[in-house]
Amino acid sequence: MNYTEEVSKKINELLEKNYDAQKGFMNAADNVDSTNLKTYFKSKAAERENFSDELKREIVSFGEKPVDSGSLTGDAHRTWMNIKSALSSNDEESILEEVQRGEKASLEDYNEVLSKTSLPQTTEAMLTRHRNAIQNSVNNAKRYESIVE
């Protein structure tokens, strides 16, 4: 595998996870009553859609083909989130906990690509910006969690 194929493969993995996150945030927005949480989740879904668009453009710039959907793991995550939401006595708290888990996993994925892959400077800057936004999301979810407890 040549360099551009290797980098594209790693970026495609992040793209797939961003599709999952976008769908997860929309699912979360559909399962909460709080207007503030709905707005927050929808804004995070839009952010992940923007990340996906940037990642797709980056992959194409390497002459490779971007994936067009999320992962099976992401589908399982969303299904579990639906079940947990339906069975929980405090839906919003449970959903926030699940979102927090998903965002921490995304953060780990970005950190792994950034630390273990030799990237062009512009690609590294884009991924670092995404990672920082995800870290901010983790911090915000903690604040929202304290509000609904």
Image (cartoon, grey):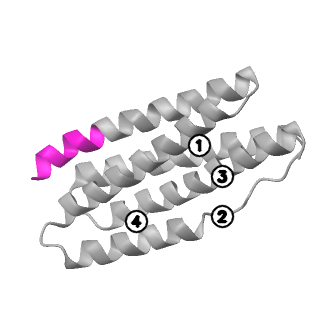
Task: State the CA–CA distance, disc 4 to disc 1.
Answer: 18 Å
Reading the chain from its start, which is encountered first: label 1 or label 3?
Answer: 3
Report the residue marked by disc 4. 27
Between the residue at mark 3 and the residue at mark 2, the CA separation in whole angstroms equals 11 Å
Q: Position of residue 35 (x, y in %)?
A: 24, 54
Q: Which residue is mark 1?
A: 50
Q: Earlier in the sequence, mark 2 or mark 4?
A: 4
Magenta residue span: 140-149
* SS label for mark 4: helix
Residue located 20% across and 56% down the image: 34
Report, in whole angstroms, how far the alpha carbon at label 1 lies from the one at label 2. Answer: 15 Å
x and y percent of residue 40 in the render? 33, 46
Q: Which mark is residue 69?
A: 2
User: Looking at numbered disc 3 in the image, what kind of residue is underneath it?
Assistant: Glu
Q: Residues within 10 Å of mark 4 (few under 14, many from 20)?
A: many
Residue at 70%, 44% (x, y): give it: 11
- Which label sits in the foreground, 1 or 2? 2
* Disc 2, SS: loop
- Mark with earlier residue (1, 2): 1
Note whether residue 59 is visible: no
* Rendering coords of residue 129 (x, y %): 54, 28
Label 1 element class? helix
Q: Which residue carries the number 3 mark?
A: 13
Frontmost of labels 1 and 3 is 3
Instruction: Please state which amino acid type lies under the numbered disc 1.
Output: Asn
- Which residue type carries mark 2? Ser
- Residue ID at (53%, 35%): 111
